[in-house]
Amino acid sequence: MNPVSNEDLTNWALLREMSDEEVDARATDDPDAQPTDAAFWQDAKVTLPPGKTRVFLDLDDDVLAWFKSQGRAYGRRMNDALRVFVEQRRGGPQSAGEVAEPDAEYDASGRGRSRAD
């Protein structure tokens, strides 16, 4: 999928015409799809994402319309956008449950103002 347009970029007709061996050969040649071994996973750590909470949220009509126009799972994309904002304010990704104080407070319009205001 093209992450910008949600367009499926797979050439399904070509894929259907290829033998299993051809598919395997193309996958092996793809530097982003290389097989892994036990050494690759040796230091891997399993982490769980933070939980989810349902909330009632008032959104501007045009903001909601834009996210909906991007296709299905618009709620997940809204959450992703909020996560990027939060992580930027924190100074980067942190473990689940950690919340850092923001550098600014926000008034009802969403515009930032310094704590001294």
Image: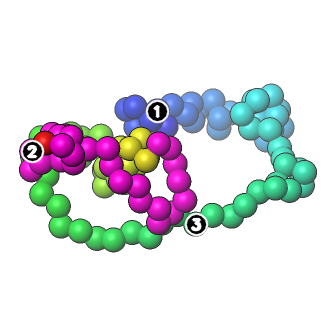
Query: Which of pointers 2 and 1 lies earlier in the amino acid sequence?
Result: 1
Nearer mark to the viewer, of 2 and 3: 2
**Residue extending farthest front:** 116
Q: Which residue is denoted by mark 3 in the rendering?
A: 48
Q: Amino acid at mark 2?
A: Ser
Q: Is residue 22 left or right of residue 104?
A: right
Q: Residue at x 39, y 69 (%)?
A: 52
Q: Which residue is denoted by mark 2 in the rendering?
A: 109
Q: Which residue is denoted by mark 1 in the rendering?
A: 2
- The one nearer the camera, 72 or 80, is 80
Q: Amino acid at mark 3?
A: Leu
Q: Quadrant of the C terminus?
A: top left
Q: Amino acid at mark 1?
A: Asn
- The one nearer the camera, 41 or 105, is 105
| Residue 1 x/y as whole percent | 49, 37
Q: Is residue 69 left or right of residue 27?
A: left
